[in-house]
Image: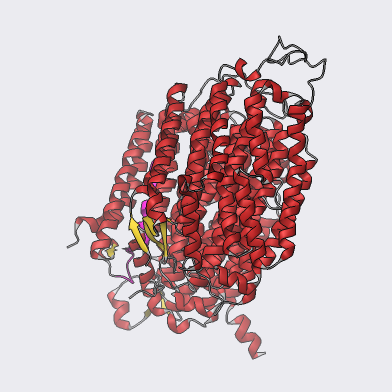
Amino acid sequence: MIETIPSIKPILAILCPALASILILLSSKRPNLRESWTLIASILQFIFILSMAPLITNGKFVEYYLLLDVIPGVNFGFRVDAFGLLFALTASFLWILVSLYSIGYMRALKEHAQTRYYFCFALAIFGAIGVALSGNLVTLFVFYEILTISTYPLVAHEQSQEALFAGRKYLAYLLTSGVFLLAAIALTYSLVGTTDFMPSGILKSSFLHRSTLLILFLLFLLGSMKAAYMPFHSWLPSAMIAPTPVSALLHAVAVVKAGVFLIVRVVCYVYGIDLMRELNLGVLLSSFAAITMIGASLFAIAQDNLKRRLAYSTISQLSFIIFGVGLLTPMGITGAMIHIPFHGLMKITLFLCAGAILVASGKTEISEMAGIGRAMPLTMIAFTIGALGMCGAPPIAGFISKWYLSLGAIQSGYWAFLALILIASLLDVVYFYPIIRTAFFEKIPKNEVLEEKEPKVQLFSEPPPSLEREQPLFVFLIIPIGITAILSILVCLFPNLFYIYPLIQRAIQNLSGG
Amino acid sequence: MLSFVEHLPLLIVVSSIISSITILIAGWINRKSAWYISTATILGQFISSIIILNHILKFGKIHYRLGGWVPPWGIEYVMDELNAYILIILLFLALLCIIYSKRNIEHELPEKVVSFYTIYQLLITGLCGVVVTGDIFNMYVFIEIFSLSAYALIASRGKISLRASFTYLVLGSIGACFFLIGIGFLYAITGSLNIHDLSILLPPFYTNRVIIASFVFILVGLSIKMALFPLHTWLPDAHAFAPSEISAMLSGIIIEVSTYAFIRVSFSVFTFKFLKILPVMEILSWIASLAIIFGSIWAISQTNLKRMLAYSSVANMGYIILALSLSLSSKTSPWGGLTPALMHIANHALMKGCLFLTAGAFIYKSNLWFINDFYQLGKRMPYTSGAFVVSAISMIGIPPSVGFVSKLYIILASIEAKRFIFVGILLLSSLLNLIYFWRVIETMYMKTGNHKGNSFPSPFPKDEIPIAMLIPIWILAVLCILMGIFWLAKIPMPILDRINLLFGLSQKL
Amino acid sequence: MEWFLAKIFAKYNYWIFIILMMIGLYGILAKNNLIKKIIGLNIFQTAIFLYFISLGAVKGGTAPIVDEKIIEKGYTYANPLPHVLILTAIVVSVATTAVALSLIIRMYQEYGTIEESEIIKKSTEKEI
């Protein structure tokens, strides 16, 4: 029996970042107050979202509608189910960590326009949580667009020519895709009169033409360019010009995950697994995703800039999720859903480490990072943990997601898919290993002078002084890195942490049974 | 005996005329009194219009016979829900523009303050008269009154606005004369000039060539007045070079009152039955689509901000006419009938009013006409730029602003009419709107220097416009968002439903 | 021949109206001199007035002034309404011409010429 509980908790969770953004704007003259608003809001939001988890895992839904019948059959509001809560948990938890990190990062680099940064960040989380908790396509669309708009000033933060160009490119891609998404939603509404998310899908092939459904799916796919699939991926590497916390949370977790979230919602909750199987769209989707999986990894190998390499890695990993959902098997979808939080954790670790390296030593290119493993041991150990997880090595989180995806590929019956996953994982190793090797096993060259930050570094005879201890605000940077790295290991060993696995189980149960 | 409220429609028009003469005389004695008299009059008119709407919603139409003569021999003023709705929008924007103009006119046209307010009051007279009247020839006269005032007001800045006003004068007069020819044909066949009377007398003649010709003449004449592509050529220059509050009035009200006149003639005089005989709505929808696309494309190529906004008005008239042309084929509430068109009339007035007033603010402060010179305006004039961003977001169509609601309803109406090409055109135009508005926003906030190499030293002195000008801008900007939420929550819908019922366009009841 | 008579001669007022209107429109569109444009506009508007007034003519009707003797004799009146309408329209036309002429004077003061093509050349956007 589907039991829905009306509760104000989704609204409270959404209000936290919204109010925080206004308060941030008002306290622009007092930085400490401003930062504390962000931290308080992020912690409060996480508590609200976590408090909904026990209810959801027991099979109930939490809903709260703000406006009823905006157009007949469409309510504007939130209806939290297991999958949505999963995404919300990921985003809100990581916001806490990235806020902490931002404080250290922005102050260490003495960045300009910090108020605008925190304001837009809060709005972006507002959009992301709204996307996660929304109950139908229309609500999702509204928050989706808010997410796009609020992240633009973050991408163009530097305000240099390059940053403005990246920002324009970002907007061009994502707002165009927003138009396609609106067309898709309008078409859905005109076909079935509702846009709610139902586990068995709302489109039925009995009275709809096959070609209509295919065109509609294409429109939805074009509408989720946030998922950075090829050939519409190039906004993501360009957006790496943003400050690192932005790249970390938004472009590894919030924005791009909203894109894949939308695709999973469309496949499972708008079309429904049975309809997808009937239309053979699952195989098409997985093959399409496989192109990106492998192609992006190949691109990643060629990148020297650390953040760009991580960006292409993100593109590749997102397509793992699309791939998994296209398999249309319980294991496959489990793998896809579980990769959302796990990849988020690992990628955040990697990006935060990249940012820490930038703060401590000013380096952005991998070829310059020789021997940095010895100068910043804690950071690079965390990086290694993240990288190993991305390759799928136990006991780090990535292992579990790759495991489920492989099982899903076997379950689907197409052996080619299993081969594709293995090839892609292998490519992951190919582009992560050089970073680790350069960091740990290469010597710092004799005439290397780390003048900008460290005037007194000794060349290689003694172990180099820890760059980490020299930076006064480094503790803000290292604590989040440490937490995410340790958590990556912990969630592999205890997947019930933060209700992640139970939520996914409940989601799969709803999809196949309910 | 008529109650007090029933006298109000006439009082609105008469008080306006008297006030304009008063301003002329009082201004001779004391120049400063001109603004006060004008504002007081418009405030009184606005409050009366709200009282009128209230009365109509409770008791039904107001019929007022001028001089006691019984129609169809006498002139009659009829107020129904459509009139009252447009009247409120009209007077609201007029009130905000006049509050804004206090500082702006002192700055821009210091010697002409008294004549400005005199003619402004005459403009309001003409506009209110068009909306209030129930006689078609009376409508022509009032159209000419407000057109003449508009010609004079546009030309008040001198230099390049003179030529713009002259072009508008010639084209506008041709348009009004075509309207007059149409009225003549109607009179020749039926012998009556009263709108209600005509709607009763006309049905036997629906296939008469003279009547069809009269409709076409009225359509073309009013198309010139409401700047429907391809008869819009006077609009970019006139709206761009007029004083800014007049630009706001022009784009927000004057072309929309002409649209109201068209709606009144098409749906009250020639009822919807006539419109089904001729393929008028079909042709109009295609013309409107062309207006939308071409208006947006031309806007992208402009470097002068006010000209860009003027072309954007051309595109928005396309939206209104597109919504109008779909009104016959879409029956489902809430987006059926005239609702999307009327909704966009109100919303466009809000958005365009705010945009033109902010453009005027930029000119007031630093004589900035060209977009390339707008760098760092986000820091120099933060509140004004903020209002610009809010109304630009609304024009692009981002929820929950008013622009989004209009576009949503037009999309839903075109889906219901099974015209999917219009959905595509609307979405494409959203993208085009985005391009030209984003250029301005990016220059205001993100660019640190001109392409010529000029830049301001930082930190910038914050140099805002006076509060008297800021308040109307911010009221409009906030309303852009608030009204959007109201429309989504369907608060003003009962009025529009009753309008649809009036014209026989809704399926309810 | 009868067709010719019926269509053209009987409806001569309509033909005059159309021809004058076209002459006026030609003047507005094709002439360069601003004064000539206004003259064209006037001709255009006058054509419309003539049309309206011709609508009011009643065969055998006399001037529409109420007089008991005429009513007793049973004469018909010509329709006074179009005349009244046209009086109003003439006033509008005069006002339009006045505004147009004052604009032309101002443009002459500003640019020193009343040829439209020269005004377009002289007015560049730089001096807004």
Relative placement, left or right, of B150 versus A181 is: left
Location of residue B34 (image quadrant) = top left
Work out which residue is located at the far top of the displayed protein and give it.
A456
Q: Position of residue A418 (x, y in %)?
A: 71, 60
Per the picture, the main secondary structure of the magenta-coloured stretch is: helix
Q: Residue at x 45, y 32 (%)?
A: A38
Q: Position of residue A405 (x, y in %)?
A: 64, 56
**Is A242 placed above or below A323 here?**
above
Looking at the figure, which quarter contains the C terminus of chain B? bottom left
Q: Which residues are magenta?
A: B71-98
Residue closest to the eye, A339 or A250: A339
Inspect this view and state whether residue B490 appears.
yes
Looking at the figure, which quarter contains the N terminus of chain B? bottom left
Q: Position of residue C6 (x, y in %)?
A: 60, 86
**Is A478 placed above or below B181 here?**
above
Membership of A321 in magenta stretch: no
Location of residue B496 (image quadrant) = bottom left
**Is A1 placed above or below B440 here?**
below
Residue closest to the eye, B350 or A77: A77
Inspect this view and state whether residue B231 appears.
no
Q: Position of residue A113 (x, y in %)?
A: 56, 26
The count of marks equals: 0
Relative placement, left or right, of B176 versus A407 is: left
